[in-house]
Amino acid sequence: MKEVLNVQNLHKTFKLSKKQQQLKKLPKPIITAVDNVSFKSYEGEVFGLLGPNGAGKTTIMRILATLINPDSGDAIVDGCSVKTDAQTVRQKVGFLTNELKLDDFFTPNYLFDFFAELHGIPKDKSAARKQELFATFGVDNFAEVKVGQLSQGMRQKASLAVSIVHDPKIIIFDEPTNGLDVITAKVVTDFLVRLKNEGKSIILSTHIFGLLENLCDRIGIIIEGKMVACDTLASLARSEHHEHARDSAHSFKTESGSLEKIFFEIYEATTKEVV
Amino acid sequence: MRNNVLTVMKKECARIIGDKKLFFTTVLLPGLMLFIMYFFMGTFMAAMFTVDDDYMYQIHTVNLPDSIAEIMQPEELRLEILPTQPHEIEEVKARIENRETDVLLIFPENFDELVANFHRDADIPAPNIQVWSNMTRTESGEAGGIVMQLLNAYHFELTHIFRINAPEYAPDGRYDLATDADLFAMIIGMMIPMLFIIFIYNGCMSIAPESIAGEKERGTLGSILVTPARRRDIALGKILGIAVFALMGAAVSIFAVLLSMPALLAGMEMEASVWEMYSLLDFALLFFVAISTTLVAVSLLSVLSAYAKSVKEAMSYAAPTMILVVLAGTSGLIFGGVPEGAGVFFIPIVNSSLSITAIFSADAINVPNVLITIATNFALTVTLTLILAKIFSSERIIFDK
């Protein structure tokens, strides 16, 4: 499989206000969100990112979408650096997150055309793409209804269609089924499988273990900004983890079982906290 | 690149056109307010300060001497003489105070005789005429003025020491060389810049925070930032999109001012034509000053809005700048007119206010200074657009929630 994403020693810190520093009880007004994270992703692969809230998943995804810059390290997207060639990277990446929304005031139809224009897609191609994607997600039924009047499921479908208007090579999905009813969630997961089969590389972040188990070829577990484990589910279940643990003397071995069980074992061993 | 600027601009326009309330408050309301204000100001002034052509001024007189009665006789003066007894004085005064009648004239008994026998060297005060009127009643104020003029003329006629503004030197009776147009230009040159700039700025204030901080707050700005469109293009597209409507608002405001001017002129009892007073160059300069001022206002408010986390916060940032804008709008009054030097025309908003004052005033316009204003404003707009683009790249500002 061809490598389409190579994340190399990605490191990102954020400055904190005095208030934030006091709340987090940190000695310095700085927090490390991503700590030397490296991983690769390939064509036709779904790579899952798993970790608790605040672990650094969103920051990694924002860096990959070129919304923010890493302090050090780099991510090479289909041969282009997020640091030096962000504009080209944006042509190759699709980003769907609850953080980025569609304007309530416009219809899915208008917004699809708007984003197609920003991506420089010729009108005839964008029309064909719109027809295909709207049919896939059933957006046709509410294409002329303002986003503000749509249900959450409808909005998510419209957002999905708009986020991949430019047929990107890498698609980053942050909690794509969050808040959706089971029917809509099924539409989304089916589409992820379809994208995978089309050879797209998908970076998927979700708290739903079942979704990761069913869809992901490999899973990276991120805790406190560090990638503490990264492998296939089967390998994660069999592996001995010690390299990334906070205390390297405290090595441990996961037992075979579900991803949920594996995650909590790793989490407990890494943070040494009772979960 | 140009396509992306246009695409973002079109979206901004679609957003404003689609929102009828926003369109009304941004584009139509400022002009409508200006028109209503000036129109009613003119109508109000006309009603307040003019007297009907056939009105007879009621002049109550006590001991009216023949000499004065004679000079008050001409029909065109429209003075109705009402002989009054000394015991009625207090009653008439009360009526004047209550704005029921116009003037009370009290002469000493035997006024003509006293005047004839008066010697300047004698230790006796000159005979006194009391003229009672009430300025809050237009008719009373006017009648008082007419009577005073007649008495002054009579006084000069008696003394024969000197004359002032004798009619033979100014056949039309006017010694004031200012034309109505000059007077009107002076008045509106002071009034219009402030209102004009406030309305432009206010129009921008109702769109810019919504367009920048609103998009940031709703998370829709990020969706645009993940596209390959350059930050600079997005910033420029947004500023131009907002500016189109702010400019439309400014154009409506200019049109409203022009429409309301005849009413204002009539109210001031002035005979002047706006179209004769101002040349095509004046209107062209006004147009470009308005455009450049709008762009400065839009870009400044956009930058402020980009720093805000919400529309509410953006409005709180913008509110203090409004005070500065109001102050800048009164530059003509602060400087006591339009300064000759070019230095002050490099200060944004102040330069716009002074340029508009210069355009509307009767004095010859210093065109280079107006051109400095336009160039300075455009340069500032470019700088602020680049700052906005920089802000769009700043993760700290864009994701600070």
Image: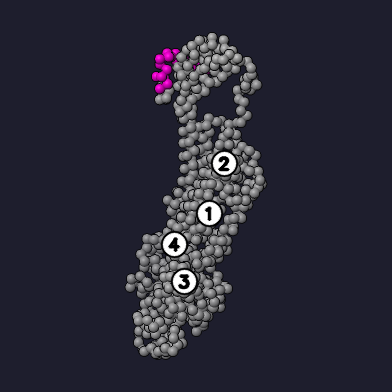
Instruction: Identify the residue position indicated by label 3 in the image.
Output: A95
Residue A46 image position (x, y, % from top left): 44, 80
Q: From the viewer's side, name the closer residue of B398 and A273.
A: A273
Instruction: Identify the residue position indicated by label 1 in the image.
Output: B298
Question: Could you tell me which quadrant the C terminus of chain A lies in?
Answer: bottom left
Q: Residue at x 40, y 82 (%)?
A: A271
In the displayed structure, B52 sits above or below B42; it is above
Residue B113 lies in quadrant: top right
Residue A72 image position (x, y, % from top left): 54, 77
Instruction: Identify the residue position indicated by label 2 in the image.
Output: B333
Cα–Cα gap, marks 3 and 2 = 55 Å
Mark 2 or 4 closer to N-term?
4
Both labels 4 and 3 in a single chain: no
Instruction: Identify the residue position indicated by label 4 in the image.
Output: B217
Residue A99 image position (x, y, % from top left): 43, 68
SS for callout 1: helix
Residue B160 lies in quadrant: top right
Pair 2/1: label in front: 2
